[in-house]
Amino acid sequence: ASEQAASEQRDWLRIHGVSKHFGAFNALQEIDLSVNKGEFICLLGPSGCGKTTLLRIIAGLEAQDRGGVSMAGREIGQLPPAQRNYGIVFQSYALFPNLDVAANVGYALKTSRAEKARRVDELLDLVGLAGTEQRYPSQLSGGQQQRVALARALATSPSLLLLDEPLSALDAKVRERLRQELRQLQRKLGVTTIMVTHDQEEALEVADTIVVMSNGRIEQIGTPEQVYREPASRFVAEFIGRANWLPLLLDQHGQATLAGQPLKVRIPTSMIGVNFSASAFCRPEDVRIENRWEVGSDSMMAVVERVDFHGGLRRAALTLCADRTIRIIADVGPNDAGYAMLEPGRRVPVTLPGHKVRVFPGTSPC
Ligand code: ATP
């Protein structure tokens, strides 16, 4: 029985072969995506990549040209929005300005007055707004209005919650607090959630799974760790976090050199003997600054060009001594060996840990 339950949870929502064009413009091309029950998914990508269009198709607010959407094994891709059983929150709170908080939250409830009042209380409690029943939207802060919108979206206990950039109109502090609360609430209720965002930090923090999109296509589907540590494409590597791109030369056996010095990295077999130029990708926090030069080490000499203070760490821009056109950014914490070495003009040994470096074909980023 538990196996059956598990298989019902898997691929609970399926988007299959969805395409959409607006005139001559292909907004979505052959999108396939499976969402497990209870999962928190973020659709992440730059403006215009099609993430909102995909959310609207799931909601039935936009019709796909091809493909479909199924929920719990049932095709819903042709149903009107009201028959799809979801709650939705938009970036602009979209509350009814002439209704008070209680009436906004209870709007979709078709129960008795007493039952409605009980449920509204429960929902307002859930979003931390107990006692605001009689206030009007104009009397609430942006963050509070968005909590009301969330309570309204959850009123009928939908099995799916759709969020279209719900936090992006809020200021930074409120946004950070609300995204934590949103995640806790989502876990507590176990409601399957799909959130559109262009904010990679937000996606990395709250999502179980991130769907990175660009130009109407999915670039990668993975956990926050996977898309950050093992980006599937240059686009993903560039879009999420900061990236160092270093030009590599490969010989026909796949041995790599950077500025004439051997670099021990894993070269994808598909690139060996085919590509003779490639780029090494590594995150700034993976670049190690040593506090002394070890004979026989893999380190390379670099010059510190500038150092910026970033709260808990120092962000250093360096160039390689062997080729000053090659720039590296390193994020160094106070407990790292090289922290005290970071002074502009100083020469420091730099190590690129081979197991954290990923190699992509071609020379220029993106
Ligand atoms: P943003 O973060 O800016 O909202 P997005 O990734 O959500 O971007 P979409 O809103 O899905 O992007 O739009 C994808 C593309 O389709 C954009 O180029 C947009 O201009 C276009 N588009 C969206 N809706 C329509 C429409 N109704 N008519 C014509 N073009 C549209």
Image (cartoon, rainbow, N blue to C red):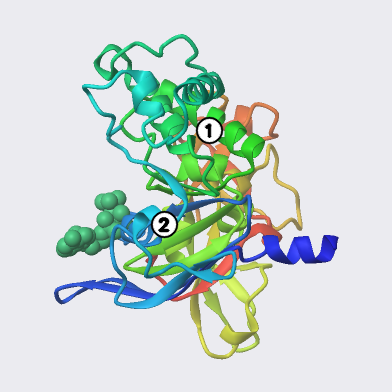
Dot 1: within a 10 Å radius of its alpha carbon, few (fewer than 14), some, or many (20 or more) residues? some
The residue at the point 48 percent across, 27 percent down is 178
What residue would you read off at disc 1? Answer: 182
Q: Is residue 362 above or below residue 348?
A: below
The quadrant where residue 17 appears: bottom left
Q: Is residue 310 above or below residue 44?
A: above
Direction from residue 277 to residue 37 in the image, left or right: right
The quadrant where residue 105 appears: top left
The residue at the point 39 percent across, 34 percent down is 167
Q: Secondary structure at mark 2?
A: helix
Q: Disc number at residue 83?
A: 2
Q: Residue furthest left?
A: 23
x and y percentages locating residue 111 in the rendered image: 47, 32
Dot 2: within a 10 Å radius of its alpha carbon, few (fewer than 14), some, or many (20 or more) residues? few
Q: Disc number at residue 147?
A: none
Of the residues shown, which amino acid type is indicated by label 2?
A: Gln
Of the residues shown, which amino acid type is indicated by label 1?
A: Leu
x and y percentages locating residue 343 in the rendered image: 51, 30
Residue 199 visible in the current orientation: yes
User: What quarter of the picture does the N terminus occupy?
Assistant: bottom right
x and y percentages locating residue 2 in the rendered image: 84, 60
Mark pair 1, 2: CA separation = 25 Å
The residue at the point 43 percent across, 35 percent down is 109
In this view of the protein, which residue sits in the foreground, 309 or 81?
81
The residue at the point 54 percent across, 69 percent down is 74
Direction from residue 265 to residue 33 in the image, left or right: left
